């Protein structure tokens, strides 16, 4: 769900539903902070579950970024908000532009089973833009369907939070928790061997995500 680092200007920074013309470039380790967003805005691992740990991802050529020796890194806001959207779906595509956030910060974790998990914070210029992106994100997730390169199964949804399972053809499945609060959207994706059984767990981590969203 979430990938690469540093910041490069893009030629179309106004629509998160359109990929950037210039992708993020792995030319140097990205900063650990993104504007006002720091590690303090992300949940500590104990709030996500027993045995969870932060993980300083070393990155590399295949990952598309250079590690910065810490567990958080700044993302290009356009690239991050675009890559967070589901792609490869068999369902009816959802059209319409989406706001691009002002800042994006990601944090890397390992679950108690040593499986990868990633949290992404998208901070917009105001709450209306955050709500518009969140609504567009949910519409695309619900319309994704099954049978494509990506299948999405909804587990539960409330007004400002939802959980779904993303399953990539021939690959792993992820539990996808999404939350909107004020001007921030938080997305937590964790690899899971039993994703359909984690609906209750997903509800328990929503307050932990909300706590750092301002």
Image: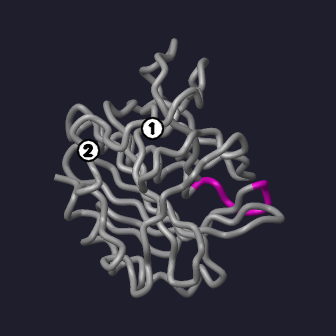
Q: What is the x, y in percent for residue 85?
A: 55, 45
The residue that mark 2 highlights is 37
Left/right of residue 5 with respect to residue 178 in the rendered view: right
Give the number of the disc on residue 153. none
Spatial separation of the CA atoms under disc 1 and disc 2: 11 Å
Left/right of residue 127 with respect to residue 54 in the rendered view: left
Taking the spot 61% from the left edge, 77% from the top edge, the residue there is 192
Q: Residues within 10 Å of mark 2 (few under 14, many from 20)?
A: many
Q: Which residues are magenta?
A: 143-149
**What colour-coding does the image apply?**
one colour
Q: Residues within 10 Å of mark 1 (few under 14, many from 20)?
A: many
| Extreme residue in the top direction | 11
Taking the spot 66% from the left edge, 46% from the top edge, the residue there is 63
Q: What is the x, y in percent for residue 43?
A: 30, 66
Mark 2 residue element: loop
The residue that mark 1 highlights is 75
Q: What is the x, y in percent for residue 140?
A: 55, 49
Q: Nearer the viewer, residue 104 or 25?
A: 25
Residue 176, above or below 28: below
């Amino acid at each position: 769900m979430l990938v690469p680092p540093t910041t490069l200007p893009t030629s179309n920074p106004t629509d998160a539903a359109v990929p950037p013309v210039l992708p993020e470039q792995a030319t140097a380790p990205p900063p650990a902070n993104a504007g006002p967003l720091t590690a303090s805005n992300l949940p500590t691992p104990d709030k996500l579950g027993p045995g969870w740990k932060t993980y300083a991802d070393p990155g590399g050529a295949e990952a598309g970024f250079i590690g910065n020796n810490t567990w958080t890194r700044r993302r290009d806001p356009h690239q991050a908000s675009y890559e967070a959207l589901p792609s490869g779906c068999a369902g009816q595509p959802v059209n319409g532009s989406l706001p691009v956030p002002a800042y994006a910060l990601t944090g890397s974790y390992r679950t108690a089973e040593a499986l990868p998990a990633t949290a992404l914070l998208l901070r917009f210029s105001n709450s209306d833009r955050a709500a518009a992106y969140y609504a567009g994100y949910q519409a695309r997730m619900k319309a994704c369907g099954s049978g494509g390169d990506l299948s999405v199964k909804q587990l539960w949804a409330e007004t400002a939070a939802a959980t779904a399972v993303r399953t990539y053809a021939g690959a792993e499945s992820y539990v996808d928790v999404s939350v909107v609060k004020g001007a921030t959207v938080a997305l937590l994706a964790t690899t899971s061997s039993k994703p359909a059984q984690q609906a209750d767990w997903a509800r328990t981590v929503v307050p932990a995500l909300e706590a750092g969203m301002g």
